[in-house]
Image (cartoon, helix red, strand yellow):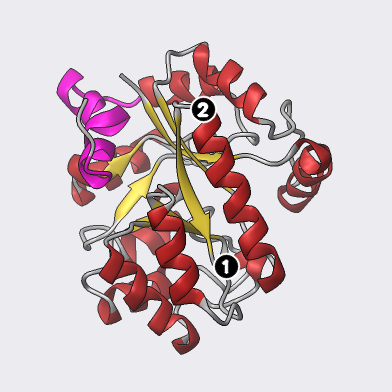
């Protein structure tokens, strides 16, 4: 069994533009355009059973339309587990968060670098409290040496203020800031996913981080449409892990977080 904990999807009318914008943001060329159909095709090559799908509101007025889109795609595709979005400036956040949970979404995705807010800003504290109260995990883009929105040190501040929040820090806790992730996050009460990391993170550092952080707090993620599932699984399989450890990262930890049965 495989659960991809990190997949972006976009409506057909904006998929090409959205994926192009992301590629330019990270200076990479992407094979896929972010459509649900391409995601399912890519994942089927390695036997993915479930995908955590999401998109990010870069402005408050986008929140409801994006959440409605994710809700619709989850209803259309039994393989999809939806995470909604929220924005710091969205006023009626409690109502929206409760609504999307009632509609079947399982968590929230934040991308502070795209949304342009510091992840530990006090403005987000009441939002985090509602999310924690609802028992919804938060998947956050973590790190980027070019910006100061979502670095590991800021994520550590969030963990200190909100100990009941289930937080998944993507990209081994800090994209291109893995040394900082080791310093501020490894060993803390936070999950990491493997997405957008194994192409660049040295294997010895990846293994050191997994060992010191704990296999039980690691999740497999691809970050589609940036990466291909087959290539990401090949990178993952180069890690020196036991069969039981691979199974934990590939799906068992995700099942536990999402309160799902195999």
Determine crowd level at label 2: few under 14, some 14-19, many 20+ residues with C-alpha closer than 10 A.
some
The disc placed on residue 147 is none
- Up-down relation of residue 125 to residue 193 (above or below): below
Percent of width and height locating residue 143: 52, 61
Determine crowd level at label 1: few under 14, some 14-19, many 20+ residues with C-alpha closer than 10 A.
many
Q: Mark 2 sits on what residue?
A: 77
Task: Say which residue appears at 28% left-offset and 30% top-offset.
Answer: 251
Characterize the magenta stretch by its predominant secondary structure. Answer: helix
Query: For numbered disc 1, what is the local secondary structure?
Result: helix
Q: Is residue 189 left or right of residue 52?
A: left
Q: Is residue 75 visible?
A: yes
Q: Is residue 75 left or right of residue 173?
A: right
Percent of width and height locating residue 116: 65, 73
Task: Say which residue appears at 22% left-offset and 63% top-offset.
Answer: 188
Q: Quadrant of residue 107?
A: bottom left
Percent of width and height locating residue 154: 43, 75
Label 1 and label 2: CA atoms lie apart by 28 Å
* Quadrant where the C terminus is found in the figure: top left
Identify which residue, 234 or 12, lies in the foreground: 12
Q: Is residue 238 visible?
A: no
Q: Which residues are magenta?
A: 239-259
Identify which residue, 1 or 74, lies in the foreground: 74
> Going from the N terminus, do you reach mark 1 or mark 2 first?
2
Identify which residue, 109 or 222, lies in the foreground: 109
Q: Quadrant of residue 32?
A: top right
Q: Are marks 1 and 2 in contact (CB under 8 Å)?
A: no
Q: Nearer the viewer, mark 1 or mark 2?
A: 2
Asked whether residue 251 is drawn in magenta, I would say: yes
Asked whether residue 181 is drawn in magenta, I would say: no
Task: Say which residue appears at 77% left-offset and 46% top-offset.
Answer: 18
Q: Quadrant of residue 223?
A: top right
Q: Mark 1 sits on what residue?
A: 112
């Amino acid at each position: 069994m495989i659960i991809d904990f990190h997949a972006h999807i976009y409506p057909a009318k904006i998929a090409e533009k959205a994926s192009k914008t992301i590629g330019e943001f990270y200076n990479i060329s992407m094979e896929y355009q972010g459509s649900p159909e391409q995601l399912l095709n890519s994942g089927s090559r390695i036997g993915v059973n479930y995908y955590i799908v999401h998109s990010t509101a870069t402005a408050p007025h986008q929140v409801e339309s994006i959440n409605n889109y994710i809700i619709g795609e989850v209803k259309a595709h039994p393989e999809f587990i939806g995470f909604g979005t929220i924005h710091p400036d969205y006023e009626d956040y409690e109502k929206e968060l409760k609504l999307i949970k009632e509609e079947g979404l399982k968590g929230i995705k934040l991308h502070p670098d795209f949304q342009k807010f510091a992840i530990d800003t006090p403005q987000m504290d009441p939002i985090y409290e509602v999310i924690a109260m609802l028992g919804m995990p938060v998947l956050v883009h973590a790190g980027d040496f070019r910006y100061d929105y979502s670095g590991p040190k800021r994520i550590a501040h969030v963990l200190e203020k909100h100990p009941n929040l289930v937080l998944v820090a993507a990209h081994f806790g800090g994209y291109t800031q893995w040394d900082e992730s080791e310093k501020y996050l490894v060993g803390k009460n936070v999950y990491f996913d493997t997405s957008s990391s194994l192409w660049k993170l040295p294997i010895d550092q990846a293994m050191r981080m997994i060992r010191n952080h704990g296999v039980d707090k690691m999740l497999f993620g691809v970050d589609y449409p940036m990466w291909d599932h087959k290539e990401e699984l090949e990178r993952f399989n180069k890690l020196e892990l036991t069969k039981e450890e691979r199974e934990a990262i590939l799906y068992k930890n995700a099942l536990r977080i999402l309160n799902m049965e195999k």
